[in-house]
Image (cartoon, rainbow, N blue to C red):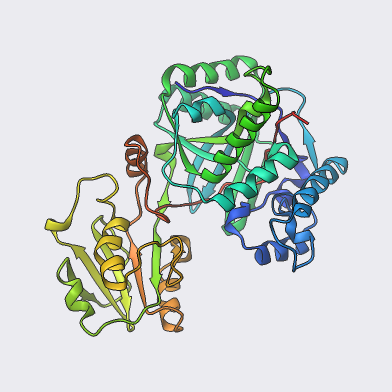
Amino acid sequence: MVKIKPFKAIRPEPTHAGDIASLPYDVLSTQEARILGDQNEKSFLHIDKAEIDLAEESSPYAEEVYLRAVSNLKEFLKKEWLVQDQQEQFYLYQLTMNGRSQMGLVVCASIEDYLENNIKKHEFTREEKELDRIRHVDATDANTSPIFLTYRDEEAVNTLIEQWAADHAPVYHFSSFHSVEHKVWVIDQSIIIDQLRQLFEQNVTELYIADGHHRTESAVKVALKRKEASPNTSIEEEFNYFLAVLFPKSQLAILDYNRVVNEVIPEDFLEKLANKFDVEKVSSSYKPVQPKTMGMYLKKEWYKLTIKPDFMSDDPVKGLDVSLLQEYVLTPLFEIKDIRTDKRIDFIGGIRGMEALSEAVDNGQFTVAFSMYPTKIDELIRVADSGKVLPPKSTWFEPKLLSGLFIHDLESN
C-alpha cells in the first residue's frame, strides 16, 4: 500500500495563476522558453528554466543558472506572486482538453515507496538530465514541478474527489497552452484529508510514473543526500516526500508518438517490408486505429503497414507497436539501433497532427515517416509490473501538467 501526505503548497496568488503557470521545463527548448519568459515576467520558467534570464551563450547547466532559480523564487515570494499556505492540505487539479477531463489529487508521495518499488517506473533516465534536476532541487530546496503518477481506479477515492469538486468553488480557473482549461481546488478539511490518506494506504497497492522519471530520481537522490547529512532526522521530514499529482488510469489518454527517419531509401525497400508486413497503399494519411498497424509516408504516398501474425509477440515490451517497428524496420533496414542517440531519427508527438509527418518529409528534412498506434495505459502498467522498461519515446501524454501551480518546500535549508 502507498503513503501520501498533505503539504503546505507554495502556489500563486489567484489573480496571478494564469500568468505564472507554464509548460514543463522539459518540453521546451531554451530558446522557446526564453521567448515566453521575455513576454511574461511572471512565467514560472524564470524559476524552472532560469537560464532564460542569463546571457544566451551561458550553459543551461552552469552554477549561476541554479543560483538564479533561487533568487527568482525568492523574488516571486517577495512580490507575493507566490504565497505559501499555512496548513497542510491536499489539492485537486483538473485539466480539460477537447472536451475530455482528468482530475488529479495533488499530494506528497513517499521516497520510501519509490525505493521499495511501490511507485513503479517504466523508463530509464539519462544522467545529464537527472543531474540537472538534482542541482535544481538541491539549490531551491523544493520540488518545483509535479510528477505525474497514475493508479488503478479506486471507486471510493473517485467518489470523494468528485464530491469535493462538486461542493466547492475552484481557487483557480483559467485556460492556457493549447486551449487547455485548468481548475484547482483546495481540500482543507482534516476529515477528508484523513479519509483520502487511509484509502490510499489501505486500498492502493501501487503508483505508476506516467511522466517525470527524471524528476522522481532527482527528488529521491536529494532526499538520500539530506538523510546522509542528517542521519537522525525523522522519516516524516519534508525532504522524504516529493510533489506528485495522482490520476486514476481510466481518465488518462496517451497520444501517438510518431517517428521520422532521414536515411537513403533502398530501391527494394517495399519488398523488404513485405517480408514482415502486409503493405497497402492508401489514398490519404493513415492514422492507425488498432494495434499492430502503422502508417508510412514515403515519396508523397501513404501506406498502411500491418504486421504479419508470425511476427507478433505476447511479451509486454516486444509486442508493442514501437518495438515491432524497431525490430523489423529501424534496426534491420536502416541500422538504427539506439534511437536515443542516433541523429537520423526524430520523434513527433501526436498533438501536432498527421500533417507534421508529411511536412517533415516533403520539406526534405526526412525521407520517411511512420505514424504509430499509441501505447495504452494498461500496456504501460503491464510493462512496469513486469520490471521491464518501455522503449524510448513510447508515450506522449496530453494535456501536460503545468508547472508553477504547486511547489513543495523541502524545509531543509
**Residue at 32% across / 44% down in the picture?**
379
Residue 374, quarter of picture:
bottom left
Q: Nearer the viewer, residue 68 or 85?
A: 68
Q: Could you tell me residue 164's position as x and y percent?
A: 57, 26
Q: Residue 275, can we see it?
A: yes
Quadrant where the N terminus is found in the figure = top left
Residue at far left of view: 310
**Residue at 60% across / 19% down in the picture?**
193
Give the vertical position of 285 relative to 123 (above or below): below
**Residue at 54% across / 19% down in the picture?**
197
Asked whether, in this view, residue 18 is left or right of residue 126, the answer is right
Q: Could you tell me residue 337's position as x and y percent?
A: 35, 63
Give the vertical position of 31 relative to 396 (above or below): below
| Number of marks in the rendered image | 0
Residue 171, quarter of picture:
top right
Q: Could you tell me residue 196's position as x and y percent?
A: 53, 20
Give the vertical position of 175 relative to 243 (above or below): below
Asked whether, in this view, residue 130 is left or right of residue 204, the answer is right
Q: Nearer the viewer, residue 339 or 12?
A: 339
Q: Nearer the viewer, residue 129 or 402?
A: 129
Quadrant where the C terminus is found in the figure = top right
